[in-house]
Amino acid sequence: MADRPNFSLMAFMAMSFAIVGLTGIFATYAVPLPLERALAREATLDEAARAVRASNPDAALAALAPRLGDSASALAGATASDIDARIADARAASRAAFQTEASVVALRVRVMIGIVTLMGALFGIILIGARSRA
């Protein structure tokens, strides 16, 4: 009777490993977010540079303000002569912020995967220990 495979134990072990894999898959959705946000901000800063050179720069910048976020205040009142310097400063600040955000997200994902891996291993150890006592 002891030689008969225990399919419920096998299923529990498979699930403990599957949870780790699913955690990794879900993490792949979080990791690229800072890059996507940075690229969107870069595109918006390019639009802002073109908008300042348009006929009504204040209205154009006001329309872009929600997408510019923190950079909107740095570009307020910009003229065609100083827009390039302001855009360069806004890009540098934006890149620094998104680099910090990417580091934080990466650390959180690593910690999450580590914790879930340990939980899966502990779960498997407990199941094997319970099986050996039975």
Image (cartoon, rainbow, N blue to C red):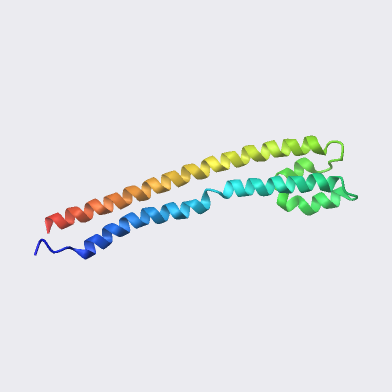
Vertical placement of residue 92 versus 4, above or below: above
Q: Quadrant of residue 90?
A: top right
Q: Position of residue 34 (x, y in %)?
A: 58, 46
Compared across the picture, whether 55 is left or right of 34 comes to right
Q: Position of residue 38 (x, y in %)?
A: 64, 45
Compared across the picture, whether 71 is left or right of 121 comes to right
Vertical placement of residue 131 versus 109, above or below: below
Which of these two is toward me, 81 or 14? 14
Which residue is at the far right? 55
Q: Which image quadrant: the C terminus?
A: bottom left
Q: Residue at x 84, y 36 (%)?
A: 82
Q: Residue at x 89, y 50 (%)?
A: 56
Q: Position of residue 109 (x, y in %)?
A: 46, 47
Which residue is at the far left? 1
Q: Residue at x 76, y 40 (%)?
A: 74
Which of these two is toward me, 2 or 120? 2
Q: Residue at x 52, y 42 (%)?
A: 104
Q: Position of residue 76 (x, y in %)?
A: 81, 43
Compared across the picture, whether 52 is left or right of 134 comes to right
Q: Which image quadrant: the N terminus?
A: bottom left
Which of these two is toward me, 5 or 30? 5
